[in-house]
Image (cartoon, rainbow, N blue to C red):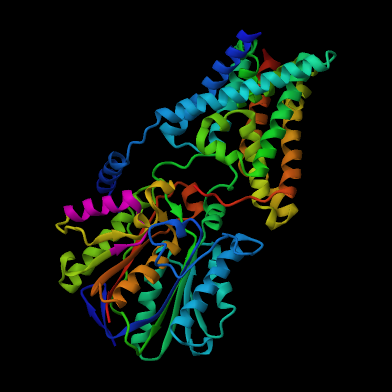
Amino acid sequence: MGKKLGKQTIMLDHPAKIIGNFSIVGEKEGQGNFASYFDMILKDDKYGQKTYEKAEKKMMLEAIKGCLHKAHLTTSQVELYLAGDLLNQIISASFSARELDCSYLGIYGACSTMSEILGIGALLMDTGAYDHILCATGSHFTTAERQYRYPLELGNQRPPTSQWTITGAGASMLSKEGNAPKITHVTFGKVMDYNIKDVNNMGAAMAPAAMDTLITLFQDTHTQPKDYDLIVTGDLGKLGSEILMDLMENKGYTLGKNYADCGQMMYTNNQKTYQGGSGAGCSAVVFNSYLVDKLKKKEYKKIIFAATGALLSTTSSQQGESIPGICHAIIVEGA
Amino acid sequence: MWLLYLKVFLVGGLICMLGQILIIKTNITSARILVLFVTIGAILEALGLYDPIVEFAGAGATVPITGFGRSLAKGAIDAVKQQGLLGVFTGGLTATAGGIAAAVIFAYIFSLLFSSKTKKY
Amino acid sequence: MNDIERDKKYNDYVQAKIPKTKNFPTLIYSYLVGGIICLLGQGIHDAILAIWPQVTQEQANVWMLIVLIFIASFLTGLGLYDKIGIFAGGGSIVPITGFSNSITSPAMEYKKEGIIFGICVKMFSVAGPVIVNGVVISFIIGLIYLFI
């Protein structure tokens, strides 16, 4: 069993190996900076389905299928399926589990879902009880817009601090055995709320949580930012990641060139997304394409993957509540 | 004739730009803007200040949603003069019934005919 | 964990950090588009009066609004109105066409949830407050006029 370091970090005895990874994205993301790394790019955001919600579910299923294929496994070899998404009652995750024949845990972590389920998966793997755990999450621009914001055809302007929920899904296959990038440490974060109420400025709401989790991880493991090839946060966006760098600087940790943010990197500058990408799919597709690939090729030896989430609902923000942020971090080492 | 069109453009554009200034300054949602402008239009009409603007700028004052507020107020005032207390209830909606009915009916028809499309930017 | 002073400091810091965008062009665009929509309205109004001389000024006004509402609703259906909106902002929200757009767009958006619970229930999810507020304010104004 893993050993607890400090207050929040767990060092795993038997690191979970990521033997399969798959990413699928929408058309707009397919024109972004990571285009050449994604496994599959959709031409049609509706994916041949009747509704966008069905399309999101189908994306997750496709990611699972692709992930199993790349890991050379069959559906029957999966023992546990961990998943989550942004929709009410996490329907995409649960409805995709309907097609699988294994235990299922549905987890809501907003946009932090990917690192949360990878962390939980790695810990469960460390118990020795499981051989293969499948982790998947995704988001869809249109379904998120329908649920959290306005109808698509409403003629309003997006504020300059807003981000673009990405259309995409990512899946990782964790395995007990194998020669693949491995999850060695897990730090589950605390909910941090610095009283940001602007729902169009998620980066600012989540940055304090990212700061807290990263500092805790550095303290617990007695490491410094420079000990890692890459420290990557989920979807803070341009503004949020600048805020995080300032916050860390104030606490005596300098995030230099080895720091990046999935949301900020997702789109090119002329794709008009203002602060960049967001959504559960954002960190999931970057992790399951670019990051795992680089780890496999040994271009990165050791990275911190810290997906960030804003734990609000439309009800809470209408009632004037501020936005609680969360960030879960995992350390992944190359094979 | 052409002078009227110039006035329509200038006044109509100005009212819309005031809305845009509000959006930039306060990040207000479009529903709130519509509510605010309807209320302002109705109050101005009740004070007798909106009719002169309509006299001056025609559609420049009736097309912006403030004109909708003006119709509501005008309808209520006229109906009260004719029917008393009943007019308090019937006036506003009677005067704006055409616009509301048109919006509902066309929305119904076009929502059956078309589906919303994904945004690209 | 709650720390009012820390939160206030952070909020002030974030406010200062938000990038300042160039707002001036959007003011011009909203002026232009808003002005053009009003011109279109005046044109329709005058055309109706010219074609049907028996129509009163008042009736022509209502017809003009109905035509504008139709055009905006149709453009919303074609998926063009939101593109005008991205460009024009207040210029396409404030005119009556924006009201029409805010009724047609949720109706279209939620039709997959059915005609009753989708189209009919959600139709007023954006513009409902406008009608509710409008009715209330006309009631108040009527009431005041009744007593003076």
**Image quadrant where one finds the N terminus of chain B:** top right
In the rendered structure, which segment of residues is drawn in magenta?
A232-250
Q: Is residue A245 above or below residue C79?
A: below
Q: Give the residue furthest to the front.
A: A36
Q: Position of residue A235 (x, y in %)?
A: 37, 58
Residue at 25% across / 72% down in the picture?
A: A300
> Of A76 and A215, which appears nearest the observer?
A76
Residue extending furthest right? C54
In front: A175, or C11? A175
Front position in the image: C32 or A82 = C32
Tell me if residue A259 comes above or below residue B85 in the rendering.
below
Q: Quadrant of the rendered structure where residue C135 is?
A: top right
Is residue B121 rendered magenta in the image? Answer: no
Asked if residue A40 shows in the view, the reply is yes
Q: Is residue B91 visible?
A: no
Please tell me which residue is depicted at 17% across the width and 57% down the height of the picture: A254
Q: Which secondary structure class fits the magenta region best?
A: helix
Q: Quadrant of residue A290?
A: bottom left
Where is residue B36 drawn, in percent x and y?
A: 55, 29
